[in-house]
Amino acid sequence: MNSDTSNVANKYLTFVLATEEYAVDILRVQEIKGWNKVTTIPNTPGYICGVINLRGTIVPIIDLRLRFNLEHLAYGQMTVVVVVKVLSVDGKERIMGIVVDGVSDVYDVAEADIKPPPDFGSVITTEFVKGLATVDEKMVIVLDIDRLLNSNELAIVESLSQ
């Protein structure tokens, strides 16, 4: 029996932001919803849209375009919220939503095919990037959803939504 797991493929949901395609582990995706109005929370960073009540759970909604310092787009019928499970540093699970331009596809990607992100120096932060993978002749940015959605600012939302 081969114990090498580097060639085992995991499924990743890909989505589009601006001209780039990003991916998250599909096991973290709880559901995909269309855009609905959110309840805003005062004194939170601009990329935190607010919260929604999802079957009794208060879910913070983060605009990934704004989180990545991209141009804001008005939300419309094509705007999608990907509801994901995030593990905090202390191992606690929470549900959050990320606003994306559109969901693309589901791909099988072997761990060995995910290459570390390049070092851009201090100009561009890659702390939220797990790596880069080439899928169907295109580059996909694989996100570390736990690091992305566990920043200090998001702790504010968690404290307000309890």
Image: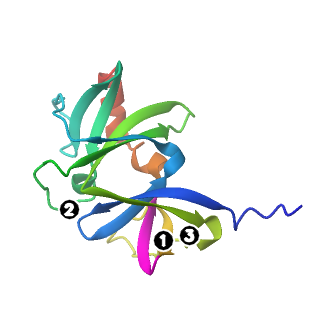
- Circles 2, 1 touching at the beta carbon (< 8 Å): no
Query: Where does the image place residue 46, in percent across and percent down from the top left?
Result: 18, 44
Find numbered disc 3 in the image and state the secondary structure of the residue it sits on. Answer: loop
Name the residue carrying label 3.
114
Q: Which amino acid does label 1 sit on?
A: Leu
Left or right of 153, for residue 70: left
Does 70 appear in magenta? no
Find numbered disc 1 in the image and state the secondary structure of the residue it sits on. Answer: strand
Residue under the point 19% across and 52% down: 78
Residue under the point 26% across and 48% down: 80
Residue under the point 15% across and 61% down: 71
Residue 16 visible in the current orientation: yes
- Circles 2, 3 touching at the beta carbon (< 8 Å): no
Find numbered disc 2 in the image and state the secondary structure of the residue it sits on. Answer: loop
Query: Where does the image place residue 141, in percent across and percent down from the top left?
Result: 42, 67
Along the line of sight, the residue nearer the viewer: 49 or 104: 104
Q: Which amino acid does label 2 sit on?
A: Leu
Left or right of 80, for residue 109: right
- Circles 3, 1 touching at the beta carbon (< 8 Å): yes
Along the line of sight, the residue nearer the viewer: 8 or 94: 8
**Of tags 2 and 3, which is closer to the observer?**
3
Query: Where does the image place residue 13, in percent across and percent down from the top left?
Result: 44, 55
Name the residue carrying label 1.
132
Query: Where does the image place residue 8, in percent across and percent down from the top left?
Result: 69, 62
Along the line of sight, the residue nearer the viewer: 122 or 29: 29
Q: Earlier in the sequence, mark 2 or mark 3?
A: 2
